[in-house]
Image: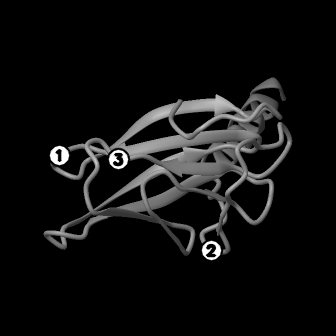
Amino acid sequence: MCHTRAATRLLALVVAASACAPAHGWRRDDARACEPDGPPRLCFVSEPDRPLTLSAGGERLLPGECAQAPEARGGSLVVEVRDGASGETRRRRVHVARGKELTVTAKANNKLRIVDRRRCQRTPHAPGT
C-alpha cells in the first residue's frame, strides 16, 4: 500500500513538472513589475545589440521587451530566436513559472541563454537588471 501511494505521488510530480505553459495568447507587456501570484513573464535582452527577435507563445519580442502568459500557469515553453541579418533561427524549451519572470538572451551563435530568473514583486525594474 505504501509503495502505491509513493508511486502515485511520484507520478503526480512528474506530470506537474512536465506540464506546458500556454503555447498561444502571450501578449507584449510594458509593465515594469509583475504580480507575485500572476502569470509567467518572459523578457528578451540582446548581447550585443543585434537584429534579433524572440518568438514565444504567439508573440514576437524585440530586445528589451517582455511578454506575459494569458493565464497564471507555468510549465515548458518553446522559444525561438531569429537573426534578422542571416535569417538563422534556433529553438529551445524553457521553463516559465507562475509569479516569476524569466529573462533570456542570444549569444553570438544565436544560442539561447537564460540570463535571470526572479520572483515577481510589485517593485519596478528594467528587464535583465
Write down the residue under mark 3. 46
Residue at the image position 57 percent from the left and 32 percent from the top: 117
Is 51 on the left-hand or right-hand side of 29? left
Q: Residues within 10 Å of mark 2 (few under 14, many from 20)?
A: few
Which color scheme is applied?
one colour
Residue furthest to the top? 2
Callout 3 secondary element: loop
- The image shows residue 119 at horizontal and vertical percentages of 71, 30
Of 77 and 110, which appears nearest the observer? Answer: 110
Q: In the picture shown, does residue 69 fall above or below 74? A: below
Q: Are marks 1 and 2 in contact (CB under 8 Å)?
A: no
Q: Disc 3 vs disc 1: Cβ atoms closer than 8 Å?
A: no
Callout 1 secondary element: loop
Question: Percent position (x, y) of residue 97?
Answer: 68, 43
Q: Is residue 47 left or right of residue 7?
A: left
Q: Quadrant of residue 30?
A: bottom right
Disc 3 from disc 1: Cα separation? 10 Å
Task: Name the amino acid, label 2.
Answer: His
The quarter of the picture where the N terminus appears is top right
Which is more N-terminal, label 2 or label 1?
Answer: 2
Which of the two discs, 3 and 1, sits closer to the camera? Answer: 3
Q: Amino acid at mark 3?
A: Ser
**Classed neighbour count for the residue bearing mark 1: other residues with Cα under 10 Å, few (<14), some (14–19), many (≥20):** few
Q: In the picture provided, is 3 more to the left or to the right than 58?
A: right
For image coordinates 70% across by 44% down, the residue present is 32
Q: Residue at x 58, y 50 (%)?
A: 42
For disc 1, the marked residue is 108
Per the image, the residue denoted by label 2 is: 24
Task: State the separation of the CA atoms marked 2 and 3.
Answer: 23 Å
Give the residue drawn at x 83%, y 34%: 122
Give the quadrant of residue 2: top right
Q: Quadrant of residue 58?
A: bottom right
